[in-house]
Amino acid sequence: MLGISDEERSLMLPSGKLSVFYSRVGWARTYLKKAGLIDSPARAKYVLSDAGKAALADADIIDNNYLSRFDSFRDFINKSSNNNTSSQPSSSDKSPDEILKDAFNTINNALADDLMTEVMKLTPTGFEQLVVNLLTKMGYGGGLEGSATVTPPSNDGGIDGIIREDPLGFDMIYIQAN
């Protein structure tokens, strides 16, 4: 629909891990979400908010200048650059290392916000499974196959998961996910 060629879609960032196209779509999605123009009712699903519908009707081009009309977008941009206090140098006075650090902070803050949004959409049972999986990936259970289980949703006495630390099951970790 936009006339983007296969060559343009396959162009990679210098890291070689992500295409420029995918990266820009991801940033556009983040910016639109921060401005409140789109919502994410479920994982990997996006819909226009009422403000987004109004923006489509109102604007010829939705770019960063347009998004700056929204307080939530400005807050996001200011937060990502550590609130740009007057004691901080302007971007033209910053070293390449400082510019990279600011970019990293922007990406990290956006990722943390998106991750929290997705976690908050989980059902209680889904959250319990996430906690058990996370603890297993962190090394609890000693790499034993099948060492972690999520307890049934009811009559579990407040215990949401159990991880066996040794093959015989003598050392157990009982998990309460809140």
Image (cartoon, rainbow, N blue to C red):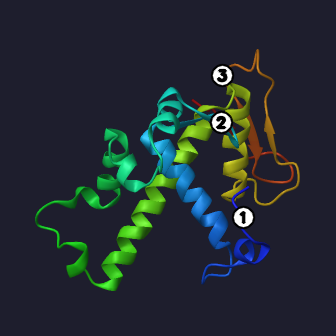
Q: How many marks?
A: 3
- Mark 2 near mark 1, Cβ–Cβ under 8 Å? no
Query: What number is the disc on residue 158?
Result: 3
At mark 3, the secondary structure is loop
- Mark 3 near mark 2, Cβ–Cβ under 8 Å? no
Check disc 1 and give the amino acid type.
Answer: Gly
Residue 166, position as x, y percentages in the image: 80, 54
Residue drawn 51% across the image and 26% down it: 50
Query: What number is the disc on residue 129?
Result: none
* Crowd band around label 2 with a 10 angstrom C-alpha radius: few (<14), some (14–19), many (20+): some
Residue 154, position as x, y percentages in the image: 76, 16
Residue 80 visible in this rendered orientation of the protein: yes
Disc 1: which residue = 3
Disc 2: which residue = 175
2 vs 1, front mark: 1
Q: CA distance from mark 3 to mark 2?
A: 9 Å
Check disc 2 and give the amino acid type.
Answer: Ile
* Quadrant of residue 43 within the rendered picture: top right
* Crowd band around label 1 with a 10 angstrom C-alpha radius: few (<14), some (14–19), many (20+): few
Q: Is residue 173 left or right of residue 98?
A: right
In terms of sequence position, does the residue under pointer 2 or pointer 1 come before the other? Answer: 1
* Quadrant of residue 25 within the rendered picture: bottom right
* Crowd band around label 3 with a 10 angstrom C-alpha radius: few (<14), some (14–19), many (20+): few
Q: Nearer the viewer, residue 36 or 108?
A: 36
Farthest residue, direction left: 87
At mark 2, the secondary structure is strand
Q: Is residue 17 left or right of residue 75?
A: right
Residue drawn 72% across the image and 71% down it: 9
* Quadrant of residue 127 within the rendered picture: top right
Above or below 81: residue 161:
above
